[in-house]
Amino acid sequence: MIYTNAYDVMETLRTTNQWLGATARAMGSYPGMAAHPWADLMRAWGEVTERSFARMTARPDWGIPSVPGGDGRDHPVRIETLVEKPFGDLIHFAVQGRAPRPRRVLLVAPMSGHYATLLRKTVISLLPDCEVFVTDWHNARDVPLSEGAFDIEAYTLYLAQFMRHLGADLHVIAVCQPAPLALAATAMIAQDTPEAQPRSLTLIGGPVDPDAAATDVTDFGRRVTMGQLEQTMIQQVGAGHAGAGRPVYPGLLQLSSFVAMNAGSHAEAFGAQILRVADGTAREADRHNSFYDEYLAVMEMPAEFYLSTVARIFKAREIARNAFTVDGQPVDIGCIDRTAVHVIEGEADDISAPGQCRAALPLLTGLPETKKAAHLEPGAGHYGIFAGRSWRDSIRPLVLRFIDAQAQPGD
């Protein structure tokens, strides 16, 4: 294991780069530098650099003050915490001054490096038509060691508790990483209290069977051993945080992996933004800032969660083989017999390639074929199937129609 000093060194490097950006911005803005041919570029580089490194440890705000209503008015949105737990909360986006919507949707956010606010656009798109609930995961560096460990079994138990709290009149949408665990949580409920199964479960671009279609992500999981992962990826939270000493997969290491997957396009985007700032055409809320303010904001992941995900979901394929257990008890996906299941995949998804998520359907041996559906969105990448144009124009209407088709409880 890499110890606490490595975590502190990495944070020092981040703050140093943030300081270098602030210094370059200040120097480039100094009146005496106005005649220098490189002053504008220095100022622009500094501004973009300072902002980027500052965002890496800032938790983004949901930024949803209101939603339009059918009455022609904007209705304020208040975030309510319904269930509060050490590693994550169940929250509700309560729209003020309107009747509750009959569609009740639980968005299961990934715990994969970014905050649940990654689903901001998804939430905004659903709020006019649905009551929206979200799993709001906490940054592991803020969780004291006294709260214990958090692995994929604990995650599954959290999901089952949140779903039970909301009741059977519920439609669950799991985005990316939690797809296999949302499937397992639904199966747990089906085994224990069949009548409490949610009306529908939509799985969007998740690794139910990582071997169904290879990607760089699945290849990485195959190439490295668990010992190598623990030695190279796990650090202990440094001093000054509530979770000091907790083993984590640090957000900055995760971010370096995200960026490396498309390094060329990221470099091009930042180069173009520096030029826009230099010539005065950049704006605070422009597309670059809107995207990277969220993309660069990363959170520490509990080490047990990361390592158990790789070992049990990717290497052992426990969900794909219907061999997953929680607290030593088998979870039989075939027990799901009331929850309609909808699989959404993107044709150009390079993280969870087509086939990985669709692998859920053959596991549902107790579910009638009429309650299973799958959709492959042409040309869509990973982000697009839950928050981009493909989501807005094609997938969102499809999901709402599927939800409406399950309006009555199953037999």
Image (spheres, grey):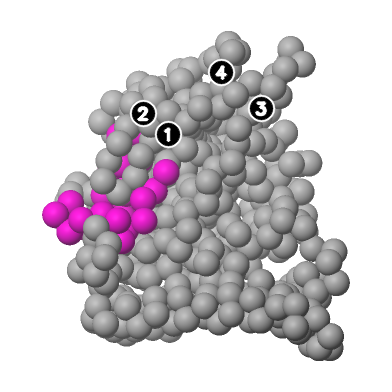
Where does label 3 land, which residue?
Answer: 67
Task: Please name whichever residue, 63 or 26, is drawn nearer the observer in this view of the structure.
Answer: 26
User: Which residue type carries mark 2?
Assistant: Leu
Q: Residue at x 66, y 71 (%)?
A: 47
The image quadrant of residue 1 is bottom left
Q: Earlier in the sequence, mark 2 or mark 1?
A: 2
* Element under disc 3: strand
For the residues marked 4 and 2, what is the alpha-carbon distance in whole angstroms?
A: 16 Å
The answer to which of marks 3 and 2 sits earlier in the sequence is 3
Residue 112: percent from left, percent from top: 45, 60
Q: From where the camera sits, is residue 190 visible?
A: no
Amino acid at pointer 1 = Ile
Q: CA distance from mark 3 to mark 2?
A: 21 Å
Mark 1 sits on what residue? 91
Mark 1 or 3, closer to the camera: 3
Q: Which residues are magenta?
A: 136-162
Residue 359: image x %, image y %?
A: 52, 54
Q: State which mark lies toward you, 1 or 4.
A: 4
